[in-house]
Amino acid sequence: MSAHFNFTDFPVLATDRFILRKALESDCFDLLALYSDESVVKYIPLEPFNSVEDSKNEMIWYEKIFADQSGLRWLIEEPTTKKVIGTCGFLNYEKAHNRIEIGYDLIPSYWGKGVMKETLSTIIHFAFTKMNINKIEAKVDPENKSSIRLLEKINFNQEGILREHEFEKGKYVDLINFSILKREYK
């Protein structure tokens, strides 16, 4: 069994088309554009961003989860333009159980172009080979059909419905729990 990832240096990863990297202060405007879009935040527990301060607070959260070793959040950068087009990463890392939860978002102009399949495949590989993860989970709003299709394409299995699992935007929401195990990973 390999050693756990040590959370000392933030890993930079590359896919065929994108760079996955740590957030920089200069990214605050790209994050504002991403998270101020109501279609991006529709199924996540965030209200649309209204200011650069909201973006800076989001980046502080990225730093916090890395510092307390509970997760990693990469920005998805298009190398030619240096524009951040989305984020992906892990949260709720349970080291004792080698389990982690995946999360992701993307600006709408890149939807349907294989971006998330490409980037998630890269971070899933990282989790299984560098972090000693045995199980990656995803919790998805049942109405988020695009995310459900994506998870099925990358070999996640539906485990069940978490009824009224979270209180988001003034109401309780069900979440579908998906997962992939290391032994299922190809």
Image (tube, rainbow, N blue to C red):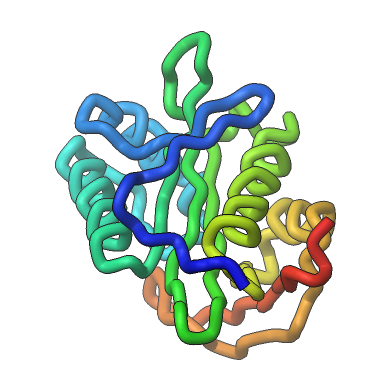
Examine the rendered structure and indicate whether residue 110 appears above or below residue 126.
above
Spot occupied by residue 24 in the image (x, y as percentages of width and height): 26, 32
**Residue 70 visible somewhere in the drawing:** yes
Count of numbered tags: 0
x, y (%) of residue 51?
Answer: 20, 38
The residue under the point 57% across, 26% down is: 18
| Left or right relative to 186: residue 141 | left
Give how far across and how far down residue 125 sits, in percent.
66, 52
Q: Which residue, as the protein is rendered here, is positioned at the far bottom?
A: 163
Q: Name the residue nearer the viewer: 96 or 85.
A: 96
Locate residue 72 relative to residue 135 in the image: left or right: left
Front one among 184 and 160: 184
Quarter assignment of residue 65: bottom left
Up the image or down, 99 lies above or below 10; here it is: below
Extreme residue in the top direction: 80
Quarter of the image with the C terminus is bottom right
Residue at 63% over, 69% down: 136
Q: Quadrant of the N terminus?
A: bottom right
Left/right placement of residue 55 relative to residue 45 reads: left
The correct choice, above or below, for 76 with respect to 26 in the image is: below
Q: Residue at x 64, y 47 (%)?
A: 120
Q: Nearer the viewer, residue 182 or 46?
A: 182
Residue 137 is at least partly visible in this image: no
Residue in view at x 26 percent, y 56 percent: 61
Quarter assignment of residue 47: bottom left
Residue 110: percent from the left, percent from the top?
A: 63, 29
Query: Horizontally, is 89 left or right of 2 in the view?
Result: left
